[in-house]
């Protein structure tokens, strides 16, 4: 059964349509230049236009940088008095801040003319490890800085805030959110695919007193890397699924998670929506020529309900999840955010957990949502590896939100990078065109390469923060 297109698919379709129209108009203009001026001039202009596009206009940004982000925080968010005295951010002396409190600073950011070509950022200094949080080129609107981890410097009046390729305007607003230390509780991370748990929550699950990692799909599709080794489409898909199944069990050991707490359910990638639509009907893999999930469950430490028939059905998925929830009894469940993360498997993973919890004798204390993908901005979190994570673009304040931010030391970030480096899906080199684009962006747009790897997720995920949302 075909699924309705997601919001992100609609935005991508519109972006590609606009791009085709732009290319057609540009081609007509180049032909006109060649006829009226010189035959070689269109060739030169076409090369320059392509270079400019790759360096400055290739980001998938499906909104105007002039739009205000719109957030409405939950009532337990405390608004504190702050002001900017030059570059110093001063807080009301009577405000007491815990070192690990989640701090969010709202302020208007306006790009300079250079900020249309070089990423505008806000530099946070006066601390042992200065931070640089990046926004969209041409930004001109309300944005939300993440000051989590900087409470001691802020309380001492030592924190400095300065725009680079941008100016800070108006009076800032600071929110403080005190939340429990979730690291002291039993944590279960729901990963739609191998590597989602590490991307979103390696820092959290590596420090929790007890952790379970549950991966829902084998992630077996899009196995072109293995087809280049001479395998057929089905063979390549199967070996990719087996490798990612192994990753989902083995890589958490790097963080000290026992093998007995790592489970791979082996359902098929991008088939969860179809399974949900027809709960009792098995939905086979798109590429692996398989309708049995058991080949991808061979590394599991104990049997699960669906092992009896191996059928990839929604009802089997719910039975597996219920068995795991009762066995692990997690106090904190970390899973994809239902609004921020648009990936269809991520949406269905969250919905499957909620459905499995209905009527179950064990209920968690809290659900924490994460976003490894966005509808509107493929580059978020913007900026370099090691930088802070700003709040993502959001333009609908109808939903109350409660961010929870965990700060990671440099050593913890490096451990996270090594865990991601073990994931087979992040190891192949990016396509040649993407490598050329990254090189042009480093040369002309001042962007830096991640020291940890070529895949974009090394830049996006290895940061000084992990950002979650209490659901």
Image (cartoon, helix red, strand yellow):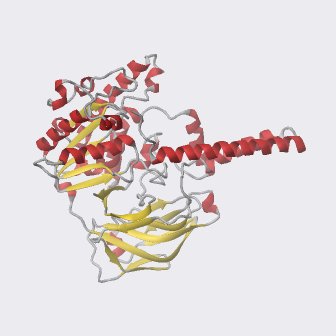
Could you tell me residue 136's position as x and y percent? 54, 58
Relative placement, left or right, of 106 versus 37 is left
Q: Residue at x 57, y 46 (%)?
A: 14
Could you tell me residue 240's position as x and y percent? 37, 26
Relative placement, left or right, of 147 versus 202 is right
- Observer-nearest of 198 and 11: 11
Q: Residue at x 36, y 33 (%)?
A: 269
Q: Residue at x 69, y 43 (%)?
A: 23
Quarter location, residue 231: top left
- Observer-nearest of 359 and 36: 359
Picture quarter with the C terminus: bottom left
Relative placement, left or right, of 306 versus 39 is left
Regarding residue 166, the answer to whether it shows in the image is yes
Could you tell me residue 448's position as x and y percent? 52, 49
Picture quarter with the N terminus: top left
- Observer-nearest of 261 and 23: 23
Q: Is residue 339 above or below residue 170?
A: above
Could you tell me residue 348's position as x and y percent? 32, 42
Total numbered badges shown on the rendered structure: 0
């Amino acid at each position: 059964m075909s699924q309705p297109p997601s919001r992100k698919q609609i935005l991508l379709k519109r972006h590609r349509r606009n791009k085709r129209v732009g290319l057609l108009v540009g081609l007509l203009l180049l032909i006109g230049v060649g006829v009226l001026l010189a035959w070689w001039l269109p060739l030169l202009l076409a090369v320059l236009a392509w270079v400019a596009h790759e360096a400055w206009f290739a980001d998938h940004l499906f909104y105007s940088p002039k739009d205000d982000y719109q957030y409405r925080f939950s009532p337990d968010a405390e608004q504190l008095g702050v002001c900017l005295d030059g570059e110093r951010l001063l807080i009301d002396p009577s405000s007491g801040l815990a070192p690990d409190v989640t701090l969010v600073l709202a302020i208007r950011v306006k790009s300079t003319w250079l900020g249309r070509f070089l990423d505008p950022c806000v530099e946070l200094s006066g601390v042992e490890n200065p931070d640089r949080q990046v926004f969209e080129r041409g930004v001109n609107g309300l944005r939300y800085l993440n000051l989590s981890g900087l409470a001691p410097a802020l309380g001492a009046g030592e924190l400095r805030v300065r725009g680079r390729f941008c100016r800070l305007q108006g009076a800032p607003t600071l929110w403080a959110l005190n939340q429990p230390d979730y690291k002291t509780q039993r944590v279960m991370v729901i990963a739609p695919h191998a590597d989602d748990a590490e991307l979103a929550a390696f820092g959290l699950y590596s420090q929790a007193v007890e952790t379970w990692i549950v991966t829902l799909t084998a992630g077996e599709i899009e196995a072109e890397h293995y087809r280049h080794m001479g395998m057929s489409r089905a063979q390549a898909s199967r070996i990719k699924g087996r490798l990612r199944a192994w990753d989902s069990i083995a890589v958490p050991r790097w963080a000290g998670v026992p093998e007995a707490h790592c489970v791979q359910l082996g359902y098929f990638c991008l088939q969860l929506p179809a399974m949900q639509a027809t709960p009792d009907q098995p939905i086979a893999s798109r590429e692996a020529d398989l309708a049995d999930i058991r080949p991808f469950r061979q590394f599991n430490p104990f049997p699960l309900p669906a092992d009896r028939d191996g059928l990839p059905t929604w009802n089997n998925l719910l039975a597996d999840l219920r068995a795991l929830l009762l066995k692990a009894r997690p106090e904190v469940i970390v899973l994809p955010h239902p609004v921020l993360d648009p990936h269809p498997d991520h949406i269905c993973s969250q919905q499957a957990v909620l459905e499995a919890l209905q009527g179950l004798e064990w209920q968690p204390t809290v659900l924490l949502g994460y976003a490894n993908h966005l509808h509107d901005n493929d580059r978020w979190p913007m900026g370099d590896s090691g930088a802070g994570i700003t709040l993502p673009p959001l333009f609908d304040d109808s939903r109350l939100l409660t961010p929870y931010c965990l700060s990671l030391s440099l050593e913890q970030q490096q451990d996270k990078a090594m865990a991601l480096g073990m994931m087979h899906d992040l190891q192949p080199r990016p396509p040649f065109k993407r490598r050329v684009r990254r090189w042009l962006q480093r040369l002309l747009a001042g962007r830096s390469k991640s020291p940890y790897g070529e895949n974009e997720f090394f830049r996006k995920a290895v940061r000084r923060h992990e950002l979650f949302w209490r659901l």
